[in-house]
Amino acid sequence: MFRSVLAIIMTVFIVSALSSAQAQEPILRLYTLDCGKIKVLDANIMDDTDSYTGSLNLVASCYIIQHGNEYMLWDAGFNPEAIKGVKDTDMFQPKIEKTIVESIAEIGLQVSDINKIGISHNHFDHIGQANVFKDAELLIGATDFDALFAGEVAEGLHPAFIDEWADGENVTKLNDDHDVFGDGSVTILSMPGHTQGHMALQVNLKKTGPVILSGDLYHFKDNYEQGRMPDFNWNREETLASFERMKSLLQSQKVRFVIQHDPDHLAFMPKFPAYLD
């Protein structure tokens, strides 16, 4: 009799503990923001083996990750003021209809709700609106951050878009993978090659499963399928190594892989303000 009662008590305790743990599990959601479009006048610049012809139409996408009561922005799109000066002869022709602030207002968020901002890499189309979220913790590849603020700035980089963190305060400089919230739900993945400190992002959603956001490891489907990369990548060998690492990650688990600049990939994501969870 005593053993039966003890077994019942233990069962109730275990069920209660499991229920409590599940109740405390934070809400995890992934929102996709349309942060603009970009026309590349010469598609061949996106392949260092010169396999493309004509122009190329890509998108710029940004993402909001909700983790309980915290919100993280992944990439920050174009700078609306800066792209007003784009000429018809410029290689990259960006357009944007709505700012990140205007978009997140649709789900009741304001600038102060964004606790963290993760940047895949330091190119202009990924840091454009970063300064708006100046009170958030910045997570960025260490070498990409240093390329913006340590020593002479290379042509084509725009530190003014992200200089609210120029003093290094509230910056987490990454040299490897990084568990953003400490529970394995959101991980920044080191994928150097496009830039020296380039990163991708994995979000382990409860219903959808793992989702990986590419950063600029690839720019569109053919880049991915053929293993091609832009002329302006920082290092070819590092890029190829990151291709292999990404391929291994995609083969080892059932993953929804999102190429952030590919219009088809953006079209298959839930249209904001809908989300994946």
Image: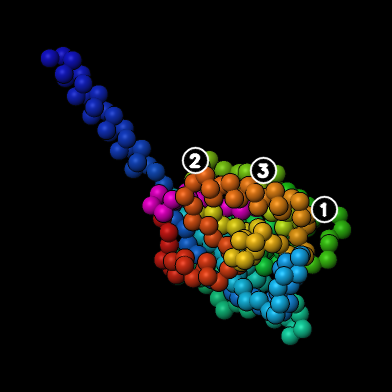
**Badge 2 vs badge 3, beta-carbon distance below 8 Å:** no
Q: Residue at x 50, y 64 (%)?
A: 32
Whole-number angstrom distance, CA of label 2 to CA of label 1: 32 Å
- Magenta span: predominant SS is strand
Q: Percent x, y for residue 3?
A: 18, 15
**Highlighted range, magenta:** 199-210
Outermost residue to the right? 152
Eyeballing the image, is 249 above or below 77?
above
103 sits to left or right of 233: left
Q: Earlier in the sequence, mark 3 or mark 1?
A: 1
Instruction: For marks 2 and 3, give the one nearer the viewer.
Output: 3
36 or 244: nearer the eye? 244
Q: Residue at x 47, y 50 (%)?
A: 254
Eyeballing the image, is 134 above or below 35?
above
Q: Residue at x 21, y 21 (%)?
A: 7
Q: Is residue 168 visible?
A: no
207 or 150: nearer the eye? 207
**Residue 208 is one of the magenta-drawn residues:** yes
**Which image quadrant: the C terminus?**
bottom left
**Helix, strand or loop at mark 2:** loop
- What amino acid type should be assigned to the residue bearing mark 1? Ala
Q: Residue at x 79, y 67 (%)?
A: 156
Q: Percent x, y for residue 165?
A: 71, 55
Residue marked by disc 1? 150
Residue marked by disc 2? 183
The answer to which image quadrant residue 54 occupies is bottom right
**Residue 185 is one of the magenta-drawn residues:** no
205 sits to left or right of 148: left
Q: Is residue 178 visible?
A: yes
Residue marked by disc 3? 176
- What amino acid type should be assigned to the residue bearing mark 2? Asp
Outermost residue to the bottom? 88
